[in-house]
Image (cartoon, grey):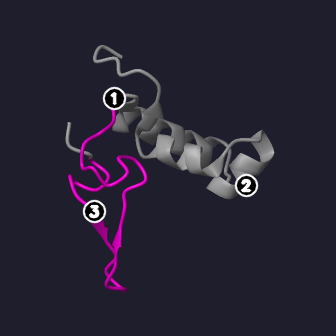
Amino acid sequence: MKCPNCQGGKIYHAVHPVYISCSICAGTGILPENIRYDPAKGATLKFSRIDEHKLTLREYCIRYHESAITRSEEERGFFQGKKNENA
């Protein structure tokens, strides 16, 4: 599957003329086998954090001892682990 984060290529920073390797696919443009993409589940996590907990990402991660990088990826729909097409 084409990487939804970078749309199949490197991310071009609009302000500075540099290419940034995608943190999800490492610049390959293909979603790795160990990443499951579920944007609906990610949106649910983000909604829960904002509307129920009333916390910023940083506040949430400090309070619940989570990695901000991992939580950010999950809220954007990228989950570590084996792909499960039926999940």
* Residue indicated by mark 3: 10
- Quadrant into which the C terminus falls: top left
The residue furthest bottom is 16
Q: Of residues 66 and 52, which is closer to you in this image?
A: 66
Along the horizontal axis of the image, is 27 left or right of 66?
left
Look at the picture and state if 11 lies above or below 71: below
Along the horizontal axis of the image, is 49 left or right of 61?
left
> Which disc is residue 33 wearing?
1
Which amino acid type is shown beneath numbered disc 1? Glu
> What residue do we see at 77% from left, 50% from top?
62
Q: Let me know if residue 18 is in the magenta part.
A: yes
> What residue do we see at 25% from left, 43% from top?
30
Q: Nearer the viewer, mark 1 or mark 2?
A: 1
Which amino acid type is shown beneath numbered disc 2? Glu
Distance between the alpha carbons at the discs numbered 1 and 3? 19 Å
Residues drawn in magenta: 4-33
Indicate the position of residue 51 as horizontal and vertical percent values: 58, 46
- Quadrant into which the N terminus falls: top left
Q: Are marks 1 and 2 in contact (CB under 8 Å)?
A: no
Along the horizontal axis of the image, is 68 left or right of 83?
right
For label 2, count other residues whose C-alpha is less than 10 Å away and answer few (under 14), some (14-19) or many (20+).
Answer: some
> What residue do we see at 42% from left, 46% from top?
76
* Residue indicated by mark 2: 59
Along the horizontal axis of the image, is 23 left or right of 54?
left
Distance between the alpha carbons at the discs numbered 2 and 3? 30 Å
Look at the picture and state if 41 lies above or below 85: below
Pick whichever of labels 2 and 3 is earlier in the sequence: 3
Which element type, helix, strand or loop, lies under badge 1? loop
Q: Nearer the viewer, mark 2 or mark 3?
A: 3
Indicate the position of residue 20 as horizontal and vertical percent values: 37, 68
